Each structure stands twice: as structure tokens, then as C-alpha cells.
Amino acid sequence: MKKKRAPAAATVLPGWNSPEWLDRCAWCHKLMGGTDERFTISLRLHPAAFREFDRGTVQPLYLDIAKKIVPVLVVEENSPVQREGKDALCHLCSGLCARALQLILKKTIGTGGA
């Protein structure tokens, strides 16, 4: 009789309020080091989002088409990103992850970041 394999250990991701999300790739959730190259996609949010989300917090964004949740940093008011007309951003570990997220964003919400 064959023994059943133990299920693979699931990656335990931090809660949404954890600052660790600032160091994780939004697409693949890889933990990035302080000297690792980072890619950024910035987004505009619907004004209603600010009734639910505080600026300066990391919030989950569910992308139905990809069946994936990505962390989005809602930027502080008067930050350089906000002065450029964007409200949130995603950090990514590679051009490949950035392109994947950008493609899904275009399909899902009609934007591709900046």
C-alpha cells in the first residue's frame, strides 16, 4: 500500500497591514531584498476607494480574470506619485512580473499603469 504524500507546505503570507508587503512582488509575492531591482506600476483609483482605504496603507486588489489578489500601496496625499495624478502603486521583482500584471490590468480595468 502506497503512503500518501504530505501536502506541500503553503507559503504563509503576511496580513495586509504588514509592512512586509512593501518588499514583496505584487505579482509573484517573492520577497525582494533591499538592493534588488524593482519595477513599479502606478494606478489611478476611483474616488470611492478613499472612503474605504486609508492613504499610506497596503490594500488587496482582486483581479478576477487572473483569480489573483495583488497588494496595492495607496500612496500618501501630496506624494510624488500622487502629484503625477496616480493614487496607488505596485512593486514588482522583474520585467516579466510587471508585464504580466500590466496585461491583466489592461484586460480587467482598462489601465496599464505608467
Image: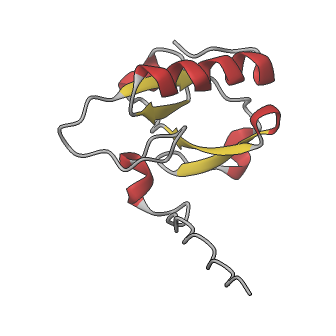
Q: At which x and y percent is residue 5? A: 63, 77
Nearer to me, 59 or 48:
59
Examine the rendering and report whether any part of residue 41 can be seen. no
Task: Identify the residue shown where x is 58% and y is 69%.
Answer: 8
Q: Which residue is drawn at 70% across and 43% down?
A: 68
Residue 90 position within the rendered picture, expressed as x and y whole percent measured from the top left: 50, 33
Snapshot quadrant of residue 61? top right
- Left or right: residue 1 versus residue 30 is right
Above or below for 48 versus 107 = below
Image location of residue 92, percent across then percent down: 43, 32
- Left or right: 7, with 40 as reference point: right
Question: Closer to the camera, 75 or 24?
Answer: 24
Whether residue 100 is visible here, answered yes or no, is yes
Residue shown at the point (62%, 14%) measured from the top left: 112
Res 37 quadrant in image: top left
Quadrant in which the N terminus appears? bottom right
Residue at x 78% of width, y 18% of height: 107
For this orientation, the residue located farthest to the front is 1
Residue 92 lies, with reference to residue 21, above or below; the image says above
